[in-house]
Structure formats: structure tokens, C-alpha cells
Amino acid sequence: MALFIDEAECISCGDCEPVCPTNSITEGVIVFEIDKKTCTECQEDFDEPECVRVCPIDNCILPLES
């Protein structure tokens, strides 16, 4: 399981990066990016993904489809 940031929606505010408990979010060339190898969707730590909780844009951070 992992999340991804929709490039068309992201405003590169950076709010998501410091709240990620697995340090899976980094600043990319265009927008912030989520490392699918380390993202756990915060399942062991929080009731909902922290990045989604703090993101000011609805539907910017979404589940990665297999």
C-alpha cells in the first residue's frame, strides 16, 4: 500500500513532508513525491494518513493503484 501526489493538483506547499512518520515524502523536481517502497499510509501510526490530513488541497494525495 502506498499513496501518490497528483502532480496536477499539488501546489508544492510542503505541508506533507514534515508530518510523514516514515520520511517517505521528498521534494521532487515538479512537486513533492512519495516513495512507494516506504509509504505505509500511516496504518501503524495514525487513523488516517498524516499527509492527507494536513494537505490543503482535496484529492491531491491519493492511493496508488496496483
Image (tube, rainbow, N blue to C red):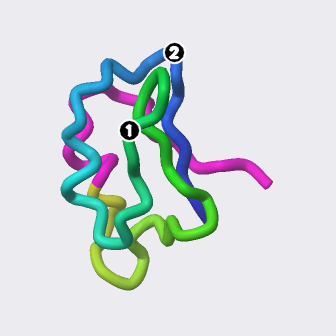
- Residue occupying the point 46% across, 65% down: 41
Tag 1 secondary structure: strand
Q: Amino acid at mark 1?
A: Glu
Q: Amino acid at mark 2?
A: Ala
Determine crowd level at label 2: few under 14, some 14-19, many 20+ residues with C-alpha closer than 10 A: few
Residue 53 in the magenta stretch? The answer is: yes
Q: Quadrant of the N terminus?
A: bottom right
Q: Residue furthest bottom?
A: 44
Sequence-first tag of 1 and 2:
2
Residue range in magenta is 51-66
The CA distance from mark 1 to mark 2 is: 15 Å
> Is label 2 in a helix, a strand or a loop?
loop
Seen as rendered, the residue at the extreme right is: 66
Which label is found at residue 8?
Answer: 2
Q: Position of residue 16 (x, y in %)?
A: 27, 46
- Quadrant of residue 59 within the rendered picture: top left
